[in-house]
Image (tube, rainbow, N blue to C red):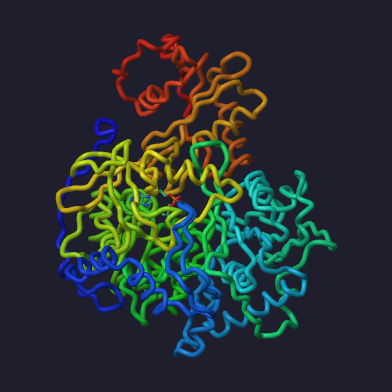
Amino acid sequence: MSNAIQSFLTENKVLNTNYNVSGESISSYESYKKLCLEVENNFDEFWSGYATDLLSWSKIFTKVLDDSNKPHYKWFVDGSMNVTVNCLDIHLTNGNANKIAIIFESDDGEVLKITYKDLLKRVCKFANGLKNLGYKIGDKCIIYMPMSIEVIVAMHACARLGIIHSVVFGGFSSKSLHERILDIGASLIITSDYQKRGGKKIPLKAAVDAAIISGNCESIKNVIVYKRAGDDINWLSSRDLWMDDLEKNQLDYCEPVFVNSEHPLFVLYTSGSTGKPKGIQHSSAGYLLWAKMTMRWTFDIRGDDVFWCTADVGWITGHTYIAYGPLSMGLTQVIFEGIPTYPNSARFWKMIERHKVSIFYTAPTAIRSLIKSSDNDRSVHPDNFDLSSLRILGSVGEPISPDTWRWYYKNVGNENCPIADTWWQTETGGHMITPLPCLNYLKPGSCSLPLPGICAAVVDESGEDVPNSTGGFLVIKKPWPGMIRNIWGNTDRFITSYFPEELHGYYLAGDGAQRDNDGYFWIMGRIDDVLNVSGHRLGTMEIESALVSHSKVSEAAVIGRSDDTTGEAVVAFIVMKGERPYNDEAINIAKELRNWIACEIGPIAKPKDIIFGDSLPKTRSGKIMRRLLRAIANGENINQDTSTIENMSIFDNFSITF
Ligand code: WT7
């Protein structure tokens, strides 16, 4: 492990003493240390204090944590609450009723605003519509929608009634959608006719129709459609309903369904190291508490903030830091339909200026692409815009390189805004390791220190702590309220993936990491066969099985290589059933395979390079030599031990296509 993982990032401190904590974050490093000690000594009191202060309960819990059936932890035992009450109703009586909850900016720049009072009204009307159709607590709903006020309404209407939602990213194909419909056993789908991104109109309802037609979807009773474009679409009148028709004539108020603390609020699918995506199941009370606590700590929230997280609701970041966290805090937030490069690469900076954004949270891949654009065209450089409203910047999804960090810090934050390099995962529910605004210094490239209550460590194969500056497995030693509760329908996989026996029941994150002498954490990438493309996880097995399901493909191996913009890029080594293709034929087949992957999984999983060969390099026991393929794809010299390879000739035989 220590040899396999090495950090090449140079450590350089950046003083952060310019920033004064003025919101709800932890005020100083000393207070941070005190809180860490507090939770270590009085675990129950610590968590119960926050849970009672920050959440509104219909029935208060009787016990903080039930750990009698590890790793099936139960938080806030016997408590009842409703997530939408905590995100919307509470603001009707605390002075936020007429505050803008959402500033929506469409792809073409149109702006719509909605207050907390009106957002609650819309959620209630829609929830009443769902209730009239017979949907109730425990039902499962797939949401496949563009970034919009309506997707927030849909998620909260589900939460209002205790319906478990599963949001599927609009960039996923009908095939991926179908897989998720079946896995969760959905009876309801909420979608949109189209989505608009970068000036293009992309059909969504048609993908839903295609998914349902592909079979075994008898459980689906209704498809509710938000009208985004208004063009003609296919319609099945016994099943399909327009969202606005359903809301019409409904009462403005809908009684919330109070659910048990542990009731699943949602299931969100993410890639793992096997072919099948995992349905990460989150709770209601613990999840929301962690969303709210991390909002306050990481972003030093103030009542006058304008918060903007650029993620899509199809990912966990869009759940915790768009749909739930900001609303629980009564913040005004920007929700953006489009993409950072349309109509040009100044879009983000223009929007920060236009809406006076004070907290901006985005991904390294977006920053890298905007650096590139502004190097080529000075007119889209952040210098041309008034970004003085910014107080805090955030980064999420992958390690941010020190160069990118410095550019972001200087050109976007004007050297005044701390960068929260937030390390977390779909499974963790919210931030885990991230620089608090009160830290005296930041280290570009390091996600720094764990939040109070998060017992993060770096251990070896047997779960023992490794010394500082030594690579190892990143684990979390104690449970926390926002943690994953299960893999939907697969408890065995839940236990083996996250709580392997050798590690004493610690939560295994699947990332390699090391800790430096100041206790700062440095994340060094995944330890399993998972790639990180543009800040999103893709399982190599998932792409491989999609490739071999193509009639012309005999064998496929997928690995990652580093890429300037997307962090990692997908590289596929392919052996065809017939003759190995060359020249134009290879280019055509590669095109066909890339389209195939776009249909099977989604454009995000398309291989950037496709390399054809006569066979794959294997050991005598038949295992594909991935390490070797990785070296080939990254253009490295092959200096590994190749004595166990059966077919050395492979290296002469591969050709690179893109
Ligand atoms: C994986 C989780 C968390 C929401 C977005 C992605 C990588 C995430 C960082 C960071 C280094 C990071 C890890 C992690 N990752 N944030 N700040 N520094 N690596 O969620 O799809 O669940 O992926 O993203 O490898 O395990 P996800």
Classify residue 309 by image quadrant: bottom left
- The image shows residue 133 at horizontal and vertical percentages of 77, 70
Q: Is residue 296 visible?
A: yes
- The image shows residue 226 at horizontal and vertical percentages of 68, 67
- Which is more toward the observer, 604 or 556? 556
- The image shows residue 159 at horizontal and vertical percentages of 59, 70
Q: Residue at 15% of width from left, 55% of height from top?
A: 13
User: Up-down: is 183 above or below 113?
Assistant: above
- The image shows residue 12 at horizontal and vertical percentages of 15, 51
**In the image: residue 33, left or right of residue 295:** left
Classify residue 636 by image quadrant: top left
Q: Is residue 354 visible?
A: no
Classify residue 435 by image quadrant: bottom left
Q: Residue at 39% of width from left, 57% of height from top?
A: 479
User: Up-down: is 650 above or below 201?
Assistant: above
Q: Residue at 33% of width from left, 54% of height from top?
A: 374
